[in-house]
C-alpha cells in the first residue's frame, strides 16, 4: 500500500512540492538510487557494512546464512557478484536451489536491505575467468600496499588486513564466481518515528511501493 511521505527528511526531497510532481514516485526513485549506491560502496569500501553482507541459502530444507564479500555490482544488469570455493556448501546449495537472499544492515543510514535473487554459479566460463583475474589483481595490489607499509616482513599472514580473504584466494580450479540476479529489494529504515518499509520489484516491469511496516 502506498503511504504518505514521512515528514522527517531521509533525503531532503520532501521539500519538493511542485504542482503535478509525483513526490511519492520521486522519493521511491531516490531510495532505489540510494540502495544501488549502498551496494556500489560495499564493493569499493572495505569497512562499509555492505562490504560483508549475509547470504542465505537453503541446506536440507533449513535456511543457512554466512558472511560473504561483495565483489562487484551492476545496476544495469541488476546483478551482484560474490566469490566462493566451488566445493563449498553454498555452491552445492545454489546449484540445487538458485533462489537466495542477501541481507545488509547499514548502521550509518539505519537501513536494512533484503535482496531477493536467483543465483548462477560460474566455474569455467568467461564470467568466472573475469572475476578470477580481478581477484588476482586485487591480491597483488594488496601485497604492494602491505610492502609499502613495510608490514609484510614482520608477519605476512597476519599483518595484511585480510577481511576479503585475498591471501587465501586459492586455486583457479577451486574458484567459483556466483552471480546473483536481483529480482526484488526490500528497504527498511528505522527511526524514532517507527519503521518505514518499501519494496522494489526489479526487472522489465520494475516498480517501487511502500509496505505496511
Ligand atoms: C568477513 C568474512 C568474509 C567472508 N567472505 C567470504 C566470501 O566472500 N566467500 C565465501 O565463500 N566465504 C566467505 N566467508 C566464509 C563464509 O562465511 C563461510 O564460513 C564459508 O564460506 C563456508 O560457508 P558454506 O559452508 O555455507 O559454503 C567469509 C567469512 C567472513 C567472516
Image (spheres, rainbow, N blue to C red):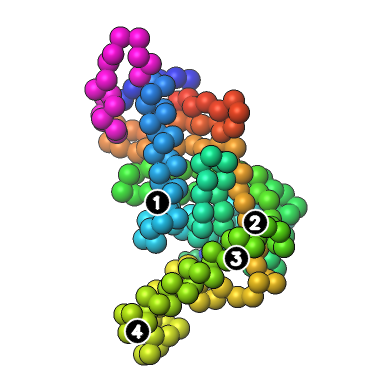
Of residue 65 and residue 23, the one placed in the foreground of this image is 23
- Predominant SS along the magenta part: loop
Badge number at residue 151: 4
> Could you tell which of marks 3 and 2 lies nearer the N-terminus?
2
Give the residue number, with chain letter if any, for mark 2: 127
* Mark 2 residue crowding within 10 angstroms, few (<14) / some (14–19) / many (20+): some
> Could you tell which of marks 3 and 4 lies nearer the N-terminus?
3
Q: Secondary structure at mark 3?
A: helix
Residue shown at the point (39%, 39%) measured from the top left: 34
Give the residue number, with chain letter if any, for mark 3: 132
Tell which tag, 4 or 2, sits nearer the viewer: 2
Q: Secondary structure at mark 4?
A: loop
> Could you tell which of marks 1 and 2 lies nearer the N-terminus?
1
Is residue 177 left or right of 157 when viewed as pictured?
Answer: right
> Could you tell which of marks 4 and 2 lies nearer the N-terminus?
2
Question: Which residue of the protein is positioned furthest toward the top in this rendering?
Answer: 19
* Mark 1 residue crowding within 10 angstroms, few (<14) / some (14–19) / many (20+): some
Pick the quarter of the image with the C terminus. Answer: top left
Amino acid at each position: 500500500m502506498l503511504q504518505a511521505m514521512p515528514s522527517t527528511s531521509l533525503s531532503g526531497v520532501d521539500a519538493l512540492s511542485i504542482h503535478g510532481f509525483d513526490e511519492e514516485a520521486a522519493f521511491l526513485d531516490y531510495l532505489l538510487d540510494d540502495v544501488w549506491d549502498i551496494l556500489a560502496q560495499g564493493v569499493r569500501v572495505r569497512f562499509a557494512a555492505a562490504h560483508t553482507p549475509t547470504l542465505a541459502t537453503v541446506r536440507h530444507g533449513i535456511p543457512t546464512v554466512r558472511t560473504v564479500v561483495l565483489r562487484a555490482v551492476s545496476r544495469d544488469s541488476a546483478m551482484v557478484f560474490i566469490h566462493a570455493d566451488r566445493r563449498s556448501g553454498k555452491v552445492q546449495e545454489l546449484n540445487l536451489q538458485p533462489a537466495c537472499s542477501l541481507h545488509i544492515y547499514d548502521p550509518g543510514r539505519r537501513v536494512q536491505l533484503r535482496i531477493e535473487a536467483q543465483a548462477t554459479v560460474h566455474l569455467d566460463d568467461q564470467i568466472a575467468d573475469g572475476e578470477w583475474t580481478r581477484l588476482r589483481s586485487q591480491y597483488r595490489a594488496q601485497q604492494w600496499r602491505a610492502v609499502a607499509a613495510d608490514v609484510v616482513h614482520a608477519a605476512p599472514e597476519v599483518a595484511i588486513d585480510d577481511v576479503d580473504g585475498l591471501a587465501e584466494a586459492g586455486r583457479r580450479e577451486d574458484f567459483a564466481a556466483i552471480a546473483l540476479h536481483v529480482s526484488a529489494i526490500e528497504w527498511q529504515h528505522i527511526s524514532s518515528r517507527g519503521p518505514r518499509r518499501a519494496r522494489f520489484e526489479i526487472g522489465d516491469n520494475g516498480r517501487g511501493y511502500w509496505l505496511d511496516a
